Image: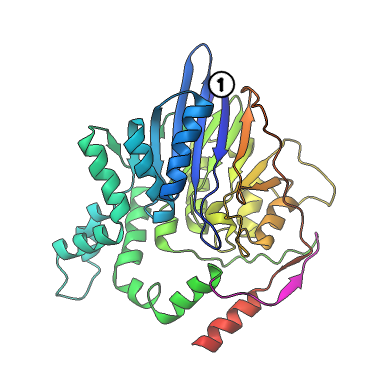
Amino acid sequence: MTQDYGYEIDMLPVGSGEKSGDAIALRYGNSTDGYKVMVVDGGTLESGEKLVEHIKKYYGTSRVDYMVCTHPDNDHSSGLRKVMEKMEVGELWIHKPWKYSKHVLDYVSDGRVTHKSLTDNIQKSLSTACSLEKMAKERNIPINEPLQGSHIGIFEVLSPNLDFYKTLLIEEYGDEAETEDRGLLGALKSALDAGKEAIARMIGEVWGVETLREDGKTSPLNETSVVMFASVSGRGILLTGDAGIRALTSAMDFADATMVPLRELRFIQIPHHGSRRNVSPSLLNRLIGNPLPEGQSRSISLSACVSASGGSKTHPRKVVTNAFLRRGATVVGTLGQTIRHHHEMPARDGWSAADKIPFHDVVESYEEAAAKVKEAA
């Protein structure tokens, strides 16, 4: 749904070193109808404090109309506790995986696991998200599940749908998770992708030759991330959390079926801090368009923004930012600073344009990472 509003999106810095997260505040509306405020993920407790200060200072309010937790990882949910403690919250939108433990139990072969024990284990592993639900109930804040087709203010949820969500929970907590996601090789691959082992070798990349792969795979819990879209004055906004190729494909399929104008995109959140596991060339071709000749611009501007720690050596991946640049996007990142994207909203004293991430002619090598996994195994 297109609205004749102005809007501003602020992505605050989260984490240090290789630890990144997401903390997003946004406001939309006009002086006649008033403004609505939304928080999408809160990062760490520290960034949650900064979100509260930011909203009070720049939005001039102590109310958050919509609080969205895209998925229950701590680097997305922890800071929301601070927002809920210190601000008036209108609605909480959050997934509750423990609610589906009975469904997951059908795919657990260990007879010692009961419905209660599985529920307890899921709640324990996602304690921060559980505490958000508890806090909301204590404050009589409405709690909603952000499933496909839901409307959160002017945003529509494109993914996940309920069947896809249940499938992902089975993958995360069912028997197959033991061998694939929690096994030795899975742990090694996750550690490597998170930058816990340095990737020593780099390779060259030119504008006309893309090395980003088609077979990226992120965790099932990341794939449950809320993907949501809004069109504000004909300008499309897409927020992605840590969604991967499967979730983003599902989102695009739903958008096509329901005539959601994704081609109006003016702002896109690069998913999962710029991980190369979450996007592919064919997905980006479908979402924002094919690569352009070097030096050619898009007919409409597109800002691709990524949240990554200022001290990270691995995020955002250069192969990913290059892929967005090839398709005509302007790429910027938090990298220790707050970045703002806005339209028809007042200027802020002392604020200037964020530094653009350039095209890199040297990117990370997949082969080096694969060799380290094989050697360790």
Query: Does dot 1 land on a helix, a strand or a loop?
Result: loop
Residue at 75% over, 73% down: 203
Residue at 55% over, 66% down: 216
Identify whether 216 is placed above or below 5: below
Lateral position of residue 23 relative to residue 132, left or right: right
Q: Which residues are magenta?
A: 196-207
Q: Quadrant of residue 109?
A: bottom left
Lateral position of residue 70 relative to residue 269, left or right: left
Image coordinates of residue 260 in percent, x first then y, are 53, 36
Residue at 68% over, 55% down: 321
Q: Quadrant of residue 115?
A: bottom left
Lateral position of residue 249 relative to residue 213, left or right: left
Q: Which residue is mark 1?
A: 5
Tell me, what colour scheme is on the image?
Answer: rainbow
Q: 266 or 69: nearer the eye?
A: 69
Image coordinates of residue 25 in percent, x first then y, are 50, 36
Q: Amino acid at mark 1?
A: Tyr
Identify whether 271 is placed above or below 114: above
Identify whether 84 is placed above or below 104: above
Q: 102 or 14: nearer the eye?
A: 14
Image coordinates of residue 135 in percent, x first then y, are 25, 41
Determine if the magenta segment contains residue 62: no
Q: Main secondary structure of the magenta part?
A: loop
Image coordinates of residue 218 in percent, x first then y, are 48, 63
Determine if the magenta segment contains residue 199: yes
